[in-house]
Image (cartoon, rainbow, N blue to C red):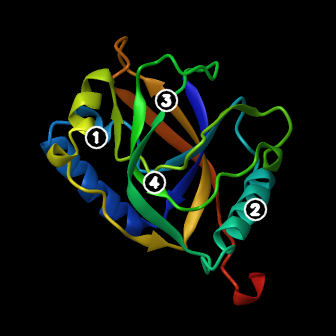
Amino acid sequence: MLRFIALVPHRDSGRLLRAYSRRLFAAGLAGAFSFPGVAPLAVVSRPFTVQELKDLAVKLRGLSSMDGRDGKIATEKAGTVAYPDSLGTLGTGLFIFGPVLDVPVLPLAAFPLDTVVYRFPLLILCAALAGKNDRVLIDKAHDIPAAPSFFFRAAALTNMVLRPLSKDGESFEWKTGVSRWLPPYRREER
């Protein structure tokens, strides 16, 4: 079982991501629905309190307001990031695949002390949890549909638990818990 802090886009953006997951599944990526359509920020040792999520949401809103972003978090081309195990090591052979987000990664110091087991080096909205065999398909870019291009301002940070359902690690169940919306964007934050 892994415990995450994850960024959940507004449901309108979630619809676009689910449509992309359907296209990936049709293209042969069996793990297209194995992981929810969120961008994991970190694997953590315990669930965050509402106040800890609120503090993190404020910091993430600040990053989305920098460099002319106007509070927008935009998707870029598809990318991958390794999926860690419960100890934060990267030997699972799984990786998260989906649209890369253009917002910078929160620094480790932004998280409550001693809670982060693994911090993701790249924020990716998960459209598929892929395995070693899927790497060949993904590397053949012409066989995989292009990631959708969109942006969102409304998003929440949430506690999430992901539990494998099989020994092969290819099917999972997840549950989200306490969440906190990013504060509204205000122009004067620039």
Residue drawn at (54%, 50%) of the image: 123
Q: Quadrant of residue 137?
A: top left
Foreground label between 4 and 2: 4
Query: Which amino acid type is shown beneath numbered disc 4?
Result: Val
Quick one: label 4 or label 3, which is nearer the N terminus?
A: 3
- Name the amino acid type tagged 1: Ala
Image location (x, y in percent) of residue 180: 66, 60
Between the C-alphas of marks 2 and 1, the distance is 30 Å
Name the residue beneath numbered marker 3.
83
Q: Nearer the viewer, mark 4 or mark 1?
A: 4
Q: Earlier in the sequence, mark 3 or mark 2?
A: 2
Task: Say which label, 4 or 1, has the lower sequence index.
Answer: 1
Q: Give the labeled residue for mark 4.
A: 100
Q: CA distance from mark 3 to mark 1?
A: 15 Å
Lateral position of residue 175 relative to residue 111, left or right: left
Residue at the (60%, 32%) spot, across then down: 3
Between 39 and 69, the residue placed more toward the observer is 69
- Residue 101's mark? none
Q: Quadrant of residue 63?
A: bottom right
> Quick one: label 2, few (<14), some, or many (20+) residues within 10 Å?
some
Residue that numbered label 1 is attached to: 32
Question: Element at badge 2?
Answer: helix
| CA distance for labels 4 and 1 | 16 Å
Q: Which residue is denoted by mark 2 in the rendering? A: 59
Residue shown at the point (39%, 70%) measured from the top left: 150
Q: Is residue 36 left or right of residue 188?
A: left
